[in-house]
Amino acid sequence: MTRSQTAMPAAVSPLGILAGNGHLPGEIARAAAARGRPVTILTVGGDAAPDLAPFTPTLVGFGEVGKILATFRTAGCREIVIVGGVNRPELASLRPDLGLFANLPAMARLIWTGGDDGILSAIVRLFETKGFTVLSPGAVAPELLVASGPAGTLTPSADEAADMLLGSSIVRALGRFDIGQAVVVSGGEIEAIEAAEGTDRMMGRVAEARATSGKRGGVLVKRPKPGQEMRVDMPTIGPDTVTRAAVAHLAGIAVLAGETLIVRRIDTIASAAAHGLFLYGFTEDARSPHLVRAPRAAAAADVRVRVLVGARPGTGALADATIGAAALASLDTLARDGISVVSRGHVLGLEPNGGYDALFARVVRLKPWGEGRWRKRSGIAVLGSELL
């Protein structure tokens, strides 16, 4: 049994679902209902998905903390699932209720914390302090987890298996820097690393680059980072993932088995087959004689920071520079000409093959939690040793 498959208690109380967008909240609701468990659904940050209509969801705003807690309690929910995507809100648009002010210290820590991992862990802690148990989607609906081996008839070649396992080791090595869950690897080379922009945008830039270069093949690898808060942030694939991989002319998609969700399973597998893409669930103990040497996990003590432009940075900027340098160093020889951008301890972007202009264009469009009228943008760029 994996960490994401912790057995669900045999409670008969309703399951509370705090739902974002996408198909996953509906699949979780239907899985619970099929097991005879009533559900109470709150949709946050936008309109409810059409497939939630049979469950009569209640719309809530990001700032309505009191309403969220009261609704779940009134419904008798003791266990909740937090699932689905959300867009980060502007602080000025939160429209707080009294519940937010009653939990102001916790909300302030949530908004001002450093990165996605910290935010998601803070959300879980907030609900736990209010007496709720937060379950992972995999605990509620284990049938949505990707199994080990191929999903469909296509399997990776030996070279593609090597790319798959190298991609897994890259995500694992970068995990402590709160960098994303996905990479694209082709022919033993890192083609793209997901950072703060998310998997979809990463795939978009791979497709855009390949439209010019004509490159084909390679693997999208998606897996949890070490220490990832799996109760609210399980890696997920679906038909849209397949479409983006096909547009980018990849050979396949590989995910960590038992730790990754697949939505609209039948449609996803059928779409992959139609596009000639393999879908594969690998395991942590997978081995391949073709595996390229995995990158090392660099410690901050292993790196040296040299200021090239401007006066010596302050303590905060120097700490960011050390994080960016350590992230590049963790990729070892794979990213000696790389560049990273870090802001307040959060890696906004990492480009292993130079590409200053493209990286800067990406990060200036990002809006980390807490950025806005009350908080000025900041950050530092770190260049790999081959660029010095």
Image (spheres, rainbow, N blue to C red):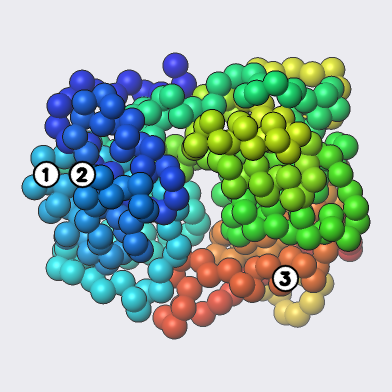
Q: Viewer-proximal residue, 21 or 376?
A: 21
Could you tell me if the residues under marks 2 and 3 are in contact, i.e. CB atoms within 8 Å?
Answer: no
Q: Is residue 4 left or right of residue 225?
A: left
Measured from the top left, where is residue 244 in percent x and y? 68, 49
Which kind of residue does numbered mark 3 sit on?
Phe
Which residue is painted at 41% across and 48% down in the image?
Answer: 84
Q: Which mark is residue 75?
A: 1
- Mark 2: which secondary structure? strand
From this view, report whether residue 319 is shown above or below residue 94.
above
Sequence-wise first label, 1 or 3: 1
Give the spatial CA distance, label 2 vs label 3: 43 Å
Callout 2 crowding tier (Cα within 10 Å): few <14, some 14–19, many ≥20: many
As displayed, is residue 71 above or below residue 29?
A: below
Residue at left offset 84%, top offset 58%: 211
- At a point 57% along the width and 49% down the height, the residue shown is 178
* Amino acid type, callout 1: Ala
Dot 3 corresponds to which residue?
Answer: 360
Q: Which tag, 1 or 2, sits closer to the chain's start?
A: 2
Disc 2 marks a residue whose amino acid type is: Thr
- Look at 46% across and 78% down and name the residue there: 372
Q: CA distance from mark 1 to mark 3?
A: 47 Å
Q: Are marks 1 and 2 in contact (CB under 8 Å)?
A: yes
In the shown orientation, is residue 320 left or right of residue 116? right
> Height in image: 370 above or below 80?
below
The part of the image, by quadrant, that contains residue 291 is top right
Outermost residue to the left: 74
Q: Can you identify the residue that label 2 sits on?
A: 40
Q: Quadrant of the C terminus?
A: bottom right
Q: Residues within 10 Å of mark 3 (few under 14, many from 20)?
A: some
